[in-house]
Image (cartoon, helix red, strand yellow):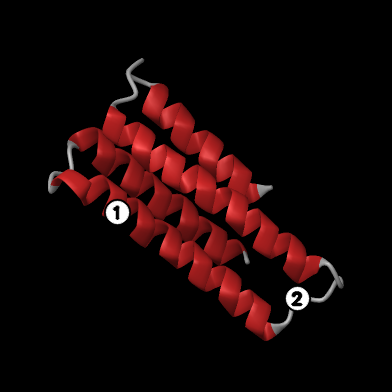
Amino acid sequence: SSIRELFDQLLKKAQEDNVISTEEQAILDKIKLDVDNYEKLLNDALEDAVLTETEAKELTDFRANMLDGAWVVADGDSIINSDEAVLLNLLLKLLKKMDLNS
């Protein structure tokens, strides 16, 4: 799914410098949990082969909340370092792309 691909791209980006910091791992863990929950929400919404307006809004809102949740985790130590900023910016870019395709 595109949401799973989103996580894979973020993981790949985090691994580029061959070091995943504790903070990066915390962001990835949060996003992984959100990806799993999003897939469940999406599967439930598509179970009857009809995506209602309400279900579509729930999915869009969930994607927006994914970014908020990742930001809260990244800012847990009151510092957003460059590696964390790269992940957050990529997450934003990928989520926007998903919104344009939905």
Q: What's the residue at 55%, 65% (across, down)?
A: 100
Occupied quadrant, residue 85: top left
**What secondary structure is found at the residue carrying circle 1?**
helix
Residue 51: image tag: 2
Residue most extreme to the left? 78
Q: Amino acid at mark 1?
A: Trp
**What secondary structure is found at the residue carrying circle 2?**
loop
Q: Residues within 10 Å of mark 1 (few under 14, many from 20)?
A: some
Q: What's the residue at 58%, 75% (across, down)?
A: 58
Relative to 69, residue 12 above or below = above
Residue most extreme to the bottom? 53
Which residue is the site of mark 1?
A: 71
Relative to 82, residue 69 above or below = below
Label 2 to label 1, Cα distance in Å?
A: 29 Å
Residue 77 in the image, given as x and y percentages of width and height: 16, 44
Q: What's the residue at 53%, 41% (across, down)?
A: 7
Which of 95 and 28 lies nearest the eye of the viewer? 28
Residue most extreme to the top? 18
**Which of pointers 2 and 1 indicates the residue nearer the eye?**
1
Relative to 40, residue 54 above or below = below
The quadrant in which the C terminus is found is bottom right
Q: What's the residue at 54%, 65% (across, down)?
A: 99
Q: Residues within 10 Å of mark 2 (few under 14, many from 20)?
A: some
Image check: 46 left or right of 65?
Answer: right
Residue 32 in the image, given as x and y percentages of width and height: 52, 43
Residue 38 in the image, given as x and y percentages of width and height: 60, 58
Residue 64 in the image, given as x and y percentages of width and height: 44, 66
